[in-house]
Structures are given as structure tokens and as C-alpha cells.
Amino acid sequence: MSTENPFENSRMQLAKCAAILKLDDGVHEMLRHPMREMHVSLPIRMDDGSIRVFEGFRVQYNDARGPTKGGIRFHPDETIDTVRALAAWMTWKCAVVDIPLGGGKGGVICNPKEMSDGELERLSRKYIQSISQIVGPEKDIPAPDVYTNPKMMAWMMDEFSKISGMNKAGVITGKPLSIGGSLGRGDATARGGLYTIREAAKELGIDLKGAKVAIQGYGNAGYFAAKIATEEYGSTVVAISDSKGGIMNMDGIDPEVAFQHKVDTGSVVGLSNTDPISNEDLLELDVDILIPAALEHVITENNADKIKAKIVAELANGPTTPKADVILHERGVHVIPDFLCNAGGVTVSYFEMVQNFYMYYWSEERVHSRLDRKMTDAYHAVLEASKKYDIDMRTAAYVVAIDRVVVAMSDRGWI
Ligand code: NAD
């Protein structure tokens, strides 16, 4: 059962895994709470001369495995419980790909679409100033998230460096390349997802060459997934979509041509040699691999029994509802859960930090091969847990992650 409160939902997932892992009640209770959170008021001079005070948060959920890491969201509907849930979720995500980081998240309640560049710069600098005592390359490393971008990360890194009196590139990731960003970050989420799809295809005996793929959403995650699946694995992308609708061609869609069409017209809809298809019907197409790469809650109890794909690879966050999960599992659909499938982004962010520490930058090939190793190992750890406990892949991913956090807490002598 899920509720409207994301933090309560994250606690329900934890409770399910605590039972499987037979966690001590006290340890379970420790994991139910963020270790630390900071609430800040951010007064900003607006362009019209007035002062507005924005509300911001930074939550550090658990740092047993290392400094906390997680994005900063600038959103009008931000709530502390959303930030808490996402910080918990980052803890499990970093643990499942076995990077030496804990989980955190930050947010500011504001509407960036109604703010000028100057106002956003002042707010970005004020936010990092206000939380500067609890962030840093060895404490907590933020990154871009909803409505924040590399430009804002650059302002925040610059402000933190001024406060520190030295260059502190490693305080934040997702920076422009000129000031310590990493090669390979742009397509990292999709590329990481494709590594897990490759491993799942091997497990299920599916040949990716010529395999049929449908992708919902054609933004950063969806477009790169289409491009990599086609160019590097020889798969056939038969359907794609965006917020305006979808298109299909069972003989294949050229990802670059579709991308250009979206740049020119604002949507993939209307591309020549394709037929229109709704976002709902796209999910039910007879394909080998379905990649939700747009919204949450698109696979529900109403359509889960109509999904024909053998693999559902969740590049989007939360595309499958808990009830749909049960149906997919019963029907033998192989789900690669979101926080495993889309962990390529945080993994390359971690590589960015490592390069900042060493002040030595890797080639794109090196980023790819190290990402491959992380994602492949993570996929197999989750697959093994799903077989060992006879549980679905999502629960298995939580079990692997939570177990790793608990081991670190124990090794530190916390429990
Ligand atoms: P994006 O904004 O670049 O693209 C989103 C795409 O979804 C767009 O093509 C948009 O038109 C489409 N879309 C919006 N509403 C839709 C609807 N009703 N039906 C169908 N399509 C719709 O975002 P993104 O970065 O590609 O992220 C997509 C998903 O992947 C999100 O759930 C995000 O949280 C997740 N994700 C992304 C990254 C990353 O590094 N980009 C990392 C982890 C998770």
C-alpha cells in the first residue's frame, strides 16, 4: 500500500526489507530517520529592489558508507518530506552501485521559471553559503536535480571556494567541463541503464541485436537510450514518445532524425515514415524491451497485465506502482528497478569527484569502462539476491543496498 507522503512510502519499503533481512528493531529504527537536516531561510534581493525570503533544506540521510551525495531541487512544490524520501533513496542508490558515498538531498522552495538569471545566481550563492558548514568534498556533495543545472553548480562551487579561501571543485558535481566536470556525464544515465539491459538480456537469452525497443520520453534519458541501443547494440527502436504523444515504426526509427525533428518542431510527433501512437499504447507494444524514461506511475494495476515486453528497464524514477510491480513479477516480466537502472548518473558524478580529488582527468573511454564495471557488478548482485531470497528485482535491490549500509554501520561500531 502506498500513501501520498513520499517519506512514509520510503519507510514502507524499508520495513519490507527489514523483515527479509531480519534486521534488529533498533537498527531498523535508526534507518527510519535522517541523521541530520538543516533548514535555512534565504533572503534575496530581487531585481525590482524588494527582498524575498526563500526556504531551503539539506538532508543528510546516512553517511555510514561515506560522505553524503544528492541533488539540489529548486521547485515551487518542494517539501521537507520529499527531500527526506529522496535523501533516503540516494543512500540506497549509492549503496546498490557500491560507491563509497551516503545519501543526501537538498531543495529550495522557489519557481525558477519566474526568476531572472541574476536572481537565480543570488539564490544559488545564498543557498550554498547558508549550508556551507555541513557540505564539502569530504562531507556532503550536492549535484543538479529538478530545475537546477551546471551553470548553478558552477556558481555554487565558486561561492564555496570563496568561503573556503581555496579552489574546491570537488564540493559539487555536474559542473561544466571547464571547471572540473567529467567527460561522459551527459549520457551516463542512459549508458548505465543499457549496461544493465545488456546483462538482463544475457540472463534471459535475448539477443540485443535486432531486439525491439519502445521508449517513453525523449529527453536526456530517453534520447541517449535510443541512440546507444541502436548504435552500440544494434537494437531496433520501434516507438518513442514525449509529452505531445508518440510515434512508431516496427522497422525502426532513426534516433538522430527523431531528435532533429524534436529540435525543429518541439516534438517527435509527425516524423515522416512513422505512425502515431498514444503514450498509453506505447507501453503495451509487442517489444522485447520497454524503457519508461519520462514520468512516474505510468505502469499501474490497470495496464500491468497488458505489458508484453520481456524486460522493463526503468530509466525514469518511479514509473511502476507497487500494485503493478506485483503483477509484473507474477507474469515473469524482468524489471530492472529505477534506482539500479538509472544509477549511471550518480556513478559518473562520483567519478567526477574522484577526478577533482586527483586533479587528473580521464578519457571518455575510461569513464565508460569504469561505469560498465560498476553497473554490471550491481546488476549481478541484485539478480543474485533476487534468486537467493526468491524476491522481485526491486525488493532485491533494496535488500542489497540496505544490507551494505547496515554492514558499514556495524563496522563503524554504531550498532
Ligand atoms: P527530460 O526533461 O530531459 O525529458 C523528459 C521527457 O519526458 C521529455 O521528452 C518530455 O517530453 C517527456 N514527457 C513529459 N511528460 C510526458 C508524458 N506525459 N508522457 C510522455 N512523455 C512525457 O528528463 P530526463 O533527464 O530525461 O529524465 C527522465 C526521467 O529519468 C525522470 O524520471 C528522471 O527523474 C529520470 N532520471 C534522469 C536522470 C538523468 O541523468 N537525466 C538520472 C536519474 C533519473
Image (tube, helix red, strand yellow):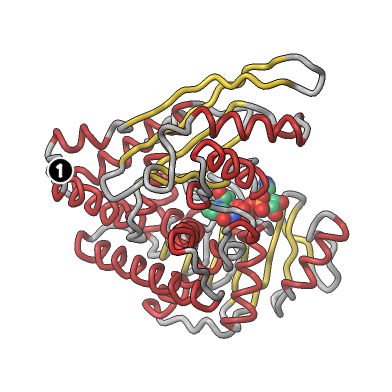
Q: Residue at x 57, y 45 (%)?
A: 157
For the point 58% across and 67% down, the residue is 183
Relative to 243, 313 lies left or right: left
Q: Is residue 3 left or right of residue 293?
A: left
Q: Give the residue number, with chain letter if any, for mark 1.
A: 23
Rendering coords of residue 13 (x, y %): 32, 42
Front-most of residues 57 and 297: 57
Q: Nearer the viewer, residue 197 or 153?
A: 153
Label 1 near ligand 1 (CB < 8 Å): no
Give SS at disc 1. Answer: loop
Tell whether 376 sits left or right of 368: left
Relative to 205, does residue 105 appear above or below in the rendering?
Answer: above
Q: Residue furthest top?
A: 50
**377 displayed left or right of 294:** left
Q: Residue 248: horizontal and vertical position, in percent?
A: 73, 68
Residue drawn where x is 37% and y is 77% of the image:
203
How many labels sit on residues?
A: 1
- For the N terminus, the image quarter is top left
Image point (62%, 19%), residue name: 43
Evaluate whether residue 65 shows in this view.
yes
Q: Does 107 sit above or below residue 409? A: above
Quarter where residue 185 is shown = bottom right
Residue 342 shows in the view: no
Q: Quadrant of residue 199?
A: bottom left
Residue 178 x %, y %: 65, 60
Dot 1 crowding, Cα within 10 Å, few <14, some 14–19, many 20+: some
Q: Position of residue 260 (x, y in %)?
A: 82, 66
Residue 396: quadrant of the picture: bottom left
- Residue type indicated by callout 1: Leu
Q: Looking at this view, is 170 or 251 the one in front?
A: 170
